[in-house]
Image: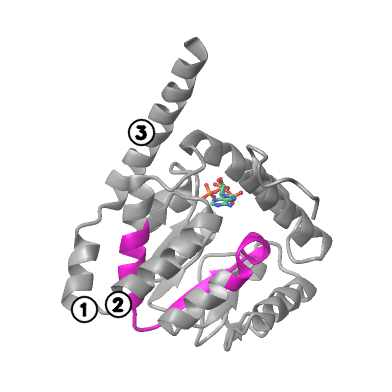
Amino acid sequence: MSDLPPSHPRYASLKTREKVVEGVETGITGLNGLIAQGRGEALDYLIGERTTAPGEDAERAAAAMLLLAERPVLSVNGNAAALVPEDMVILAEKIGAPLEVNIFYRTEDRVKKIADLLRSFGAEKVFGEAPDAVIPGLDHARAKAARGGIYDADVVFVPLEDGDRCEALVKMGKRVITVDLNPLSRTARTSMVTIVDNVVRAVPNLISLVEEMADLDDEELRLNLAAYDNRAALRRSVEEMISHLMGQFSVLED
Ligand code: ATP
């Protein structure tokens, strides 16, 4: 990692970028992960590089959904493995869920590296190295899933998922929670709960919310979930981007 001073105005963003670059160098993240990160950075800039009110509402709904789930599973791709491996393991432990490595351009070597990384942070159950089921409607490599993992889950948390796979999971009847800084992507529009926030903020926020809401009974959790409207939250996220940009523009005009 470079010796970027924490006082640098773009410190958090540049550190995040470095983690993805390091992920590529160590063989955890695919080259396409760099492009996804670049798109994410641009959208994060538009939203002001902070968790917005609709992002927070989505995170609260996601925490309720994870706590209510009977067979929750957390999916980890190459970018999530580079950016938030330890937090994904902590979240999995807090809700008693297994993790499953689920990468777009699958190579056995990369799956193993990600699984080993998660285990190095204490993950107890990691699926993905020996998939024994297929998700209907996807081409062979991307359809691979594990029984006991994503294939049998009722709730799947899939940060940074691609639109096709997200749609296929929803068609299987799964309740999908995603993290995507693009409120207009197919993934964002298909998921039941879309957290429009950077995964480096969203996953730590989820850990705090799951801790905070752990004592709520199922009825109270259901009320939290019922108060949430994904489409309205996506619209509010777009509005957040517009008003943030207009705010920046008026600073330039002054
Ligand atoms: P879709 O198929 O859903 O329309 P896409 O093809 O536009 O998605 P992908 O390239 O599959 O997008 O995935 C990248 C998505 O992940 C982009 O929408 C990008 O904004 C988002 N993204 C990238 N990095 C992050 C991050 N750190 N946190 C949250 N979202 C991110």
Residue 5 sits inside the magenta stretch: no
Residue located beneath label 3 in the image = 239
Amino acid type at image mark 3 = Glu
Instruction: From the viewer's side, name the closer residue of 53 and 8.
Output: 8
Q: Give the Cα separation between the discs numbered 1 and 2.
A: 7 Å
Q: Give the Cα separation between the discs numbered 3 and 1.
A: 32 Å
Residue 211 at x, y percent in the picture: 37, 74
Residue located beneath label 1 in the image = 218
Amino acid type at image mark 2 = Leu
* Lateral position of residue 27 relative to residue 106, left or right: right
Residue at 42 percent across and 22 percent down: it is 246
The residue at label 2 has a CB less than 8 Å from ligand 1: no
Mark 1 Cα within 10 Å, few/some/many (few <14, many 20+)?
A: few
Q: Which residues are magenta?
A: 59-86
Q: Residue furthest right?
A: 25
Find numbered disc 1 in the image and state the secondary structure of the residue it sits on: helix
Number of the label disc, if any, that sits on residue 68: 2
Mark toward the start of the polypeptide (1 vs 2): 2
Residue at 46 percent across and 48 percent down: it is 186
Mark 2 Cα within 10 Å, few/some/many (few <14, many 20+)?
A: some
Residue at 52 percent across and 76 percent down: it is 90
* Lateral position of residue 25 relative to residue 100, left or right: right
Q: Is residue 42 visible?
A: yes
Number of the label disc, if any, that sits on residue 60: none
Magenta part, dominant SS? helix
Residue at 42 percent across and 24 percent down: it is 247
Callout 1–callout 2 Cβ contact below 8 Å: yes
Instruction: From the viewer's side, name the closer residue of 177 and 89.
Output: 89
The residue at label 1 has a CB less than 8 Å from ligand 1: no
Find numbered disc 2 in the image and state the secondary structure of the residue it sits on: helix
Mark toward the start of the polypeptide (3 vs 2): 2
